[in-house]
Image (cartoon, grey):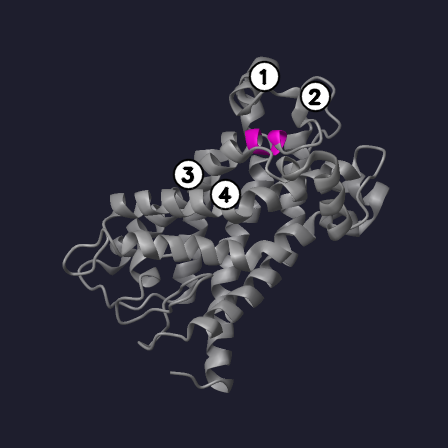
Amino acid sequence: MWPEVLSGRGPNRLRLGLASVPVSGGGKITHTVKAILAGGIAGGIEICISFPTEYIKTQLQLDKRAKQARYSSITHCVRLTIQEHGFLGLYRGLSSLFYGSIPKSAVRFGMFEFLSNHVRDADGRLSNSKSFLCGLGAGATEAVVIVCPLETIKVKFIHDQTSGNIRYQGFIHGIRAIVQQEGLHGIYQGLTATIIKQASNQAIRFSTMTSLRNWYQGDNPKKEINPFITAIFGIAAGAASVFGNNPIDVVKTRMQSLEAHMYKNTFDCAHQIYKNEGLSGFYKGTIPRLSRVCLDVAVVFVLYEQIVRFLNFIWKAE
């Protein structure tokens, strides 16, 4: 996720709404529809592979009983979930993320490109600090338009599974039930926390990727970066974003849970977490989230490049 790549400038790049990676040995811009299709396929596969880690992370973050926690460890959470709901229980809430992967990333990268094109220098270069600010804007936009409602639905679905009285019988039924019972506010719970989380998330990732790319290429911006190096950089950027904003991710999860009514607002939620669970409460679910994010970046970039190569082979477009 590099600014120069996303801007559609430079000799080695792909232009798209979902994701962008350099093309080895190529300088042609990929057709936008082709790029969105490739990114959607890669994103869908990646979510199916890594979602169990997202499920576990969410369960651990919802397990707020500091002295009488339901789960004693990551493995205990996995084992108990499979015992009670079978292996597919680890995929509860998958549909909300699966359906939203394409529009979420389209908004993210589209807004980043729009913002970055207004702050580049005369040579079309984007500084690390400006990349950080553009990432903030892109993350905040995706939070309002796509992420908040989808994340709220996902968290409610996962929490519903362990509530003892399952309310939602599927994606459509769940949305209908939430809107009927709580109105649109029901799918926009935790909006403030989501904006802060997504904005900081993308700011950290974009600026980290930009810094690593600039370091690797040195004085040669045309230096080719192979998929393995891209994956390594993505893992580093993902890890930086996890450690940098996990506290707000915990707050967001609590604000979107079935027990969100316990908190007056986002700041009250953060205060109660600190008061009842201490600083460690803000880092619940860090390890599974770390594995999910690192896997996300590595898998989606490698898959994306290969899918684009395949589409270029079967679909010739200017």
- The mark closer to the camera, 4 or 3, is 4
Give the magenta range: 251-255
Q: Which residue is mark 2?
A: 65
Q: Is residue 293 magenta?
A: no
Q: In the rendered view, tell whether residue 33 sits above or below residue 248.
A: below
Q: Earlier in the sequence, mark 4 or mark 1?
A: 4
Q: Earlier in the sequence, mark 4 or mark 3?
A: 4
Q: Counting other residues with Cα less than 10 Å from the Cα at mark 2, is it few (<14), some (14-19), or many (20 or more)?
A: few
Measure the C-alpha gap from mark 3 to mark 1. 22 Å
Q: Give the amino acid at mark 1.
A: Gln
Q: Which residue is mark 1?
A: 272
Q: Nearer the viewer, residue 238 or 7?
A: 7
- The mark closer to the camera, 2 or 4, is 4
Q: Which residue is mark 4?
A: 144
Q: Main secondary structure of the magenta part?
A: helix
Q: Are marks 3 and 2 in contact (CB under 8 Å)?
A: no
- Label placed on residue 200: 3
Measure the C-alpha gap from mark 2 to mark 4. 30 Å
Residue at 70% in and 41% down: 179
